[in-house]
Image (spheres, rainbow, N blue to C red):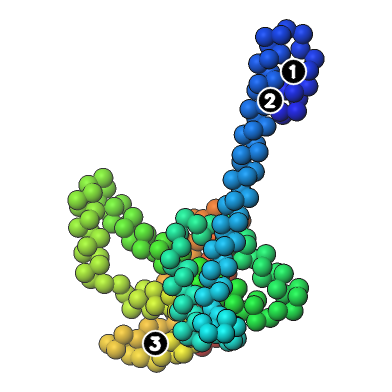
């Protein structure tokens, strides 16, 4: 588009109009260069964010990665991820993790692939937990209509009543290492109802409701939707295997 403007400026005979077209072409070029620069800086920032999370999984003294990671290293990675502004955990961040994972796979670095998978799993769990919390507030607001005071009362009442056993178990699962899922699921399924036990059917229903209310509401085809959907599908698979 701006190239055509520049061509018109070259062929324009009216000096005043020629000057206006030349100025417009220059402004457009400057704007595009600024956008490209901002995009590059944004990608650099996301790469640095990914690097911080990955490095948090290294042993503090040696700087080496011992796979499988210890629970302390996994917790350190999660703390580092949670310290990042959620707005920065965007498509650029996810695309960077995905690109690094593909490169590690091509280079035969299976341990790094595993670590980067954990980054995506942690991201998905924390993002879904935030969305579930926001969904609770939105439901309260919808019930109360436009009365914000009443909405706050509804949310407070829901919080006082507490989540259902299935909802609580799901919240616990999505903030823990996926390597611990099987043990946690077996323990919960073995308990009786009055002991806080949860059936596989109840938990599967909770996951499916989250998929419908949270994940399907994300931008179709986005990395965020794909990563979160795969995460929940994996949880359903684990449930069905037990």
The quarter of the image holding the N terminus is top right
Nearer-N-terminus badge (3/1): 1
* SS for dot 3: helix
- How much space separates mark 3 and mark 2, taking CA atoms? 66 Å
Judged from this view, the residue extending furthest toward the top is: 14
Q: State the residue at coordinates (72%, 75%).
A: 105
Q: State the residue at coordinates (62%, 60%).
A: 95
For label 1, the crowd category at 10 Å Cα-Cα, with few meaning under 14, some 14 to 19 and many 20 or more, is: many
Q: Which residue is mark 2?
A: 25
Q: Which residue is mark 1?
A: 9
Q: Position of residue 114 (x, y in %)?
A: 62, 79
Q: Position of residue 181 (x, y in %)?
A: 48, 84
Q: Which residue is mark 3?
A: 188
Q: Position of residue 99 (x, y in %)?
A: 67, 64
Look at the picture and state if 38 lies above or below 44. above
* SS for dot 1: helix
- How much space separates mark 2 and mark 1, taking CA atoms? 8 Å
Image-based side of 140 in relation to 25, left or right: left
Is the residue under label 1 in contact with that under label 2 (CB below 8 Å)?
A: yes
* SS for dot 2: helix
Look at the picture and state if 234 lies above or below 180. above
Let me know if residue 222 appears in the view.
Answer: no
């Amino acid at each position: 588009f701006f190239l055509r403007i520049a061509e018109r400026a070259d062929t324009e005979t009216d000096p005043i109009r020629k000057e206006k077209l030349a100025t417009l072409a220059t402004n457009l070029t400057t704007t595009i260069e600024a956008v490209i620069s901002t995009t590059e800086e944004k990608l650099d920032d996301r790469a640095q964010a990914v690097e911080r999370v990955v490095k948090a999984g290294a042993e503090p003294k040696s700087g080496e990665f011992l796979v499988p990671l210890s629970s302390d290293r996994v917790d350190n990675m999660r703390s580092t991820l949670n310290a990042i502004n959620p707005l920065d955990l965007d498509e650029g961040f996810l695309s960077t993790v995905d690109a690094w994972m593909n490169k590690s796979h091509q280079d035969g670095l299976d341990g790094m692939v595993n670590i980067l998978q954990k980054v995506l799993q942690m991201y998905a769990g924390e993002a879904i937990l935030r969305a579930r919390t926001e969904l609770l507030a939105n439901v309260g607001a919808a019930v109360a209509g436009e009365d914000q005071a009443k909405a706050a009362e509804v949310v407070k009442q829901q919080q006082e009543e507490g989540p259902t056993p299935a909802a609580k178990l799901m919240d616990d699962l999505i903030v823990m290492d996926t390597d611990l899922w099987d043990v946690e699921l077996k323990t919960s399924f073995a308990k009786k109802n009055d002991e806080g036990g949860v059936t596989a059917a109840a938990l599967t229903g909770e996951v499916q409701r989250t998929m419908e209310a949270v994940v399907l509401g994300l931008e179709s085809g986005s990395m965020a939707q794909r990563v979160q959907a795969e995460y929940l599908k994996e949880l359903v698979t684990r449930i069905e295997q037990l």
